[in-house]
Image (tube, coloured by chain):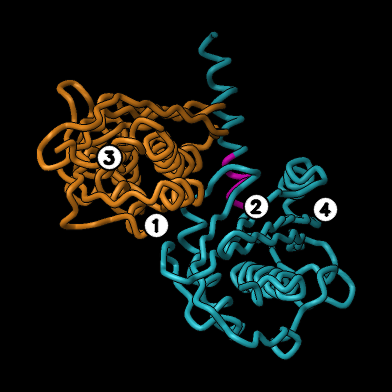
């Protein structure tokens, strides 16, 4: 019995050390300020593909030996895409067959849950096209910090919740960007 | 750091984790603060011509967005708004034609006293030194229709006794989930009552 107990403890530590315990990414919740920005700009968009740039962590982020998984398609590019769709839908700004299409490339994806302060940086290059013509292209980045914890599970929970807050902030920067709004409301030149 | 020091740190951590675990087994009871007098449905003003409304809700913890709590409580906020019978249709989507926008932000501002110190004291005495924690909630609600915006602010709280502490006089214990549900319902109904009394829902 004692040997089995020791084995269980060692196996548990080995699993954590190997980063085998994973948690799904949080359900994305649109923010009020993003909804207000979209209502104010009155844009209508559809959302195309979101991928990750080479070298950017797209499948999982490791926090103290735990793994945070990407969106429903298993990637963080997909998570950002789903977040953008939810934001647009909440503001009735999503148009499946609209002339403007938003795509993105994840350029930075970092999550840290140290003992005192947790932090995340999420960056993306957003591209807006109208009938396959690029009308907006800009790289944006959001940084967010929060109170972390010595206790691993508490720190993990806070990190998971605050990762989606960082994505909220990134999309907030995009929706409030004057160039983006001007491009999304522009008319064809001909 | 010597090996001995490391062992002492590890032992301290073990004691801390153990006391935290034991604390979780302690008696924990929640009570809804009576300072905000409950408003009944019959006390809500009648709106002559109810309009559709889009409800935007956000839960915050000490001023920071808390998406998990927002997701967990959004349904309750929508339901409380619908149960008021002040609107012809209630939606969580904005941008609906002729709909007003009801924005509700509830911020869990926490305990104004020294909750951590109280908690540690209760934990270290295994509940013999009980404590009472007051968890405050500040609500800001606004209603915008066409060019006009009306706003109101409210405060509410959940009182929680931990360990060997007598109940606040005259209050009945409820589960933590029931307590937060009652707090959210009451904040929404009080906010709607205040806004209706400011003629927000009669605006043309």
Q: Residue furthest top?
A: B1
Chain bearing tag 2 is B
Q: Which of disc 3 and disc 1 is earlier in sequence?
A: 1
Determine which residue is flagged by label 4.
B129
* Label 4 in the same subunit as label 1: no
Determine which residue is flagged by label 2.
B107
Q: Is residue B63 magenta?
A: no
* Label 4 in the same subunit as label 2: yes
Q: Is residue B20 magenta?
A: yes
Q: Which mark is residue A91?
A: 1
To which quarter of the image does residue B63 belong? Answer: top right
* Label 1 in the same subunit as label 3: yes
- Kindly report the distance in space between the C-alpha atoms of the residues bearing marks 1 and 3: 19 Å
Name the side, left or right, on which B73 lies relative to B125: left
Q: Position of residue A138 (x, y in %)?
A: 29, 25
Let me know if residue B190 appears in the view. yes
Name the mark nearer the viewer: 1 or 2: 1
Q: Secondary structure at mark 2?
A: strand
| Residue B23 vs residue B40, the one in the foreground | B40
Chain colored orange: A
- Kindly report the distance in space between the C-alpha atoms of the residues bearing marks 4 and 2: 29 Å
Q: Give the magenta-colored segment's residue range.
A: B17-23
To which quarter of the image does residue A76 belong? Answer: top left
- Kindly report the distance in space between the C-alpha atoms of the residues bearing marks 1 and 2: 23 Å
Determine which residue is flagged by label 3.
A186
């Amino acid at each position: 019995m004692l040997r089995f107990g020791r084995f269980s403890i060692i196996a548990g530590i080995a699993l954590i050390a190997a980063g085998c315990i994973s948690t799904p990414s949080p359900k994305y919740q649109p923010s009020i300020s993003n909804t207000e920005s979209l209502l104010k700009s009155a844009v209508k968009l559809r959302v195309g593909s979101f991928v990750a740039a080479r070298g950017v962590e797209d499948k999982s982020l490791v926090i103290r030996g735990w793994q945070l998984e990407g969106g429903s398609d298993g990637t963080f590019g997909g998570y950002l895409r789903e977040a953008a769709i939810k934001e647009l839908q909440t503001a009735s700004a999503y148009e499946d067959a609209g002339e403007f299409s938003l795509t993105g490339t994840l350029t930075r994806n970092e999550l840290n849950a140290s003992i005192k302060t947790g932090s995340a940086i999420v960056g993306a290059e957003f591209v807006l096209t109208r009938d396959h013509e690029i009308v907006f292209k800009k790289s944006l980045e959001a940084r967010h910090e929060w109170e972390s914890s010595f206790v691993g599970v508490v720190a993990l929970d806070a990190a998971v919740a605050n990762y989606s807050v960082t994505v909220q902030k990134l999309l907030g920067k995009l929706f409030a960007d004057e160039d983006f709004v001007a491009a999304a409301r522009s008319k064809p030149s001909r | 750091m010597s090996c001995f020091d490391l062992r002492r740190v590890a032992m301290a951590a073990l004691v801390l984790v153990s006391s935290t675990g034991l604390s979780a087994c302690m008696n924990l009871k929640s009570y809804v603060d009576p300072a905000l007098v409950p408003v009944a449905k019959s006390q809500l003003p009648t709106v002559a011509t109810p309009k559709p409304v889009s409800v935007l809700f956000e839960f915050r913890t000490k001023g920071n967005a808390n998406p998990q709590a927002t997701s967990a409580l959004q349904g309750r906020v929508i339901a409380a708004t619908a149960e008021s019978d002040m609107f012809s249709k209630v939606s969580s989507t904005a941008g609906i034609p002729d709909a007003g926008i009801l924005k509700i932000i509830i911020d869990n501002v926490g305990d104004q006293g020294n909750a951590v110190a109280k908690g540690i004291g209760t934990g270290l005495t295994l509940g013999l030194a009980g404590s009472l924690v007051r968890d405050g909630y500040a609500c800001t609600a606004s209603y915008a229709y066409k060019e006009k915006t009306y706003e109101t602010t409210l405060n509410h709280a959940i009182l929680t006794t931990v360990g060997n502490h007598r109940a606040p006089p005259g209050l009945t214990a409820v589960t933590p989930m029931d307590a937060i549900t009652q707090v959210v319902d009451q904040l929404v109904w009080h906010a709607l009552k205040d806004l209706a009394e400011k003629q927000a829902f009669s605006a043309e």
